[in-house]
Amino acid sequence: MKRTINSLLKMKDEGQKISMLTCYDYTTAKIMDKSGIDMILVGDSLGMTMLGYPDTLAVTMEDMIHHGKAVCRGVEEIFVVMDMPFMSYQTSVYDAVVNAGRLIKETGANAVKLEGGAAVCEQIRAISDAGIPVCAHIGMTPQSTNVFGGFKVQGKDLAKAQQIVNDALAVQEAGAFMVVLECIPAKLAAIITEKLQIPTIGIGAGADCDGQVLVWQDMTGMYTDLVPKFVKVFADGNRTVTEGFKAYDEEVKAGTFPAEEHTFKIDDDIIAQIK
């Protein structure tokens, strides 16, 4: 059955963990849809994993819509969340609502995600009031990498830890149905998860969150430009695919592919009549 906000909230209430992965294309979405995964995030991480940028800042609304459409065509059961790219919601509440509406309308996704705590609560409230579910994202927010000085763990001193707690409570109050906690100490994430009524989804935030999210190319070893500490490789797709490419290259050059079973036949008498 299709995952919904109600079913996800019920999972938190019943202590069931929520699984989430990023996805950016139709083929991968179809595979995930049959794998038991609860949620897909069409992340602006596509800037790095799909487009080769050094970070997420160059990703546009058009990039997100293009990939979001492909993903949504491939799912039947998974709940799909769309990232709002850099500067699609920070400029004004009006821009935030319009761009959130575009992401939902033009892709068929179920919710949007935006980065920030108390500073974006006005946007969260307005988008939610427009009938669009919002997932918040606090802690290490990749769109603020220039402010943080890189991808660094957040909330390690008292003031910053308390601010993250305050941000979590603020986004819940503003109407977020879920919050991603990225790169914060596990004990801090556990406190936040206990305090909130909405589910927490951790990425580098420990096992006490209500669920987990990873970039699918990270957890299959496909993306190696940056490998965060929190990543576990569950399947060595990089090696498998590399071996497949090499084997294909070798057989093409040796003339052993395509073999007879890969070719189509024609009657010899037809061939004999060709001039």
Image: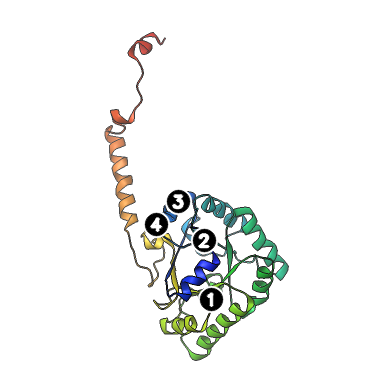
Neighbours of disc 2 within 10 Å: few (<14), some (14-19), many (20+): many
Residue that numbered label 2 is attached to: 79
The answer to whether 93 appears left or right of 232 in the picture is right
Q: Which residue is mark 4?
A: 35
* Disc 2 element: strand
Asked if the residue under mark 1 is in contact with the one under mark 4, i.e. CB atoms within 8 Å, the reply is no
Q: CA distance from mark 3 to mark 2?
A: 13 Å
Residue at image coords 62%, 75%? 175
Helix, strand or loop status at disc 1: loop
Can residue 248 be seen by looking at this rendering?
A: yes
Q: Is residue 35 above or below residue 210?
A: above
Give amino acid for label 1: Ile
Of callouts 1 and 3, the N-terminal one: 3
Q: Amino acid at mark 2?
A: Phe
Alpha-carbon span between mark 4 and mark 1: 25 Å
* Residue in front for this viewpoint, 186 or 4: 4
Q: Residues at badges 2 and 1 in contact (C-beta under 8 Å)?
A: no
Which quadrant would the C terminus be assigned to in this image? top left
Q: Which numbered disc covers residue 198?
A: 1
- The 10 Å Cα crowd at callout 1, few under 14, some 14 to 19, many 20 or more, is many
- Tell me the SS state at disc 4: loop
Q: CA distance from mark 4 to mark 3?
A: 9 Å
The residue identified by callout 3 is 30
Q: CA distance from mark 4 to mark 2?
A: 13 Å
Q: Nearer the viewer, residue 209 or 76?
A: 76
